[in-house]
Image (spheres, rainbow, N blue to C red):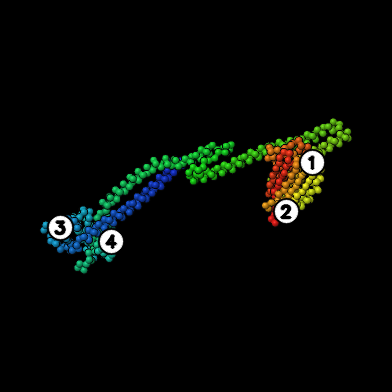
Amino acid sequence: MITRLPRFLRRLHAPRSLRKQLLATSLLILSALLLLIGVLQYVLMRNFIYSNRAETMEAQLRSVPRDFFYRLIYGDFSNSFSGGSMGSMPGNNPSGQRNGEGGRPLLLDAHTTIAAYSSDGTFTDLQKDTLSESAAPRLNDQQYNELLIHTTDKATGSYRLITASDGSQHLAVFMDLGRPGGNKILLQMSVETGPLKDVILQQLMIFAVLAVAALLAGLFLYLPALRKTLVPLSNMGDAAESIDAGNLDVRFPVNQGQTEIDKLSHSFNGMLERLEISFRGEREAKEQMRRFAADASHELRTPLTSIHGFLEVLLRGAADNKEQLYNALNSMHGESRRINKLVEDLLLLARMDGAPQLRAKELQLDEIIGEMQPQLLVLAGSRRVTFDCSRGIRGMYDPDKIKQVVLNLFHNAVQHTDKEQGAIHIALHARNHEAELAVSDNGSGISAEHLPHVFDRFYRSDSSRTRKYGGSGLGLSITKSLVEAHGGEISAESAPGKGTTFTITLPCLAGW
């Protein structure tokens, strides 16, 4: 039970609510500040009251002629002279009557005492003359001797606290009376600090009551203000509850008037935007993978079905007929090449999607196109082919991959242009420190709804025509991957009936 108590107390004094924590922390800080102010007030007020009383006492001592104190100390008269106050003491009365001759005792406050200390060690308490209720407190001789050295007859406002034999504390001031008869006399006037402390404690009690009232007012006034201040944070909590993996379009409220909360909202909104893009990309990747698997299965199933059909025909006896056997084998060979090309394209795309490795070296693009020109002319057949290539455009390229890019685009142009009326144009120029390669044709063109998808895998704008030439819909996808591996970009412009232009931009070296 003893070991569990501190943990319970910690839970008791550590509220989980942020509002309560802020309120408790603020009140604790305010309490500490009020306590510090109270301590400082006590110290400063005590010093002020003590100094003020010391100055008053010094003024009272110096308002009385010194001869009056000499008579009291040395006994020139058996009793003190009459006087209603220190300002009207018998020292101001030339008659100087004794107490027995009609004079009155020296009247002071009941808590005030006067004493004198002589350099010969004599301590004289004038309690009877002042009618004080208590005896004058006394210091030791060493302390008095030090005071005899440093005390003057001028008002300084300095004082000393003396503890009497009965334990009471007195505030004392000292004045040098001079050297009558060769002895230096130190006059001591003291007053009990009890009444002064009562005044100080009364002021502190008033301050304490006001401090408690301030804390209570802070408790009832600060809580609604704190609740209003935390409204933006509560709004963020409400928004966070409505966000899940399928609802990432919700955003935290911004510009709520609090810099820290607004900054946090912007940070969370940026994170949500990145998460939304990531989830969207993941969904698109899954959909693309599903579509890719379906298309790849379809592309592989068609030639495999064809080969399987020819094999069944041959097994049924067609192998005995040489003409049928030759036609079947020829068709099977074409389908097997189609499968082989499809598998090679898929493997190439897989490598490009991973970490493409290029054997790049410095070369000139116009020389690569010049090397390919005879092959392109043969592939074009009766189509008209023109070249417009600027010389000297150099860069870091993989020659085999660049040739494959040009061949894919040229082959695509051949497929979509007329054999007799078709025209293909290849242009190579440098613009803004980039090499721009364009392959244009005057073919049937691509409609607007198909144009954004021409680089998608297994996408065909005209599937029957593409399949006729053995295409699988991967050529442009491979071309795009190869261009991006070189740090370039590819785009397409087309209109139905007006042909198509594929434009490639590649980085080139300066000083071409």
In the rendered image, the vertical position of residue 48 relative to residue 254, given as above or below:
below
In the rendered image, the vertical position of residue 21 relative to residue 51, given as above or below:
above
| Number of other residues with Cα within 10 Å of mark 1, as a class: few under 14, some 14 to 19, many 20 or more | few
Residue type highlighted by circle 2: Ile
| Number of other residues with Cα within 10 Å of mark 3, as a class: few under 14, some 14 to 19, many 20 or more | many
Q: Of discs 4 and 1, which sits in the foreground?
A: 1
Q: CA distance from mark 3 to mark 4?
A: 29 Å
Depth check: 263 or 114 in front? 263
| Number of other residues with Cα within 10 Å of mark 2, as a class: few under 14, some 14 to 19, many 20 or more | many
Residue type highlighted by circle 4: Thr
Q: CA distance from mark 1 to mark 2?
A: 32 Å
Q: Of discs 3 and 1, which sits in the foreground?
A: 1
Task: Decide if residue 53 is in sight here.
Answer: yes
Q: CA distance from mark 4 to mark 1?
A: 122 Å
Circle 2 sits on which residue? 393
Q: Of discs 1 and 2, which sits in the foreground?
A: 1
Q: Residue furthest top?
A: 316
Q: Which mark is residue 421?
A: 1
Circle 3 sits on which residue? 82
Judge left or right: residue 166 versus residue 346.
left
- Disc with the residue nearer the chain's start (3 vs 4): 3
Please say if the residues under marks 4 and 1 sit with CB atoms less than 8 Å apart.
Answer: no
- Disc with the residue nearer the chain's start (2 vs 3): 3
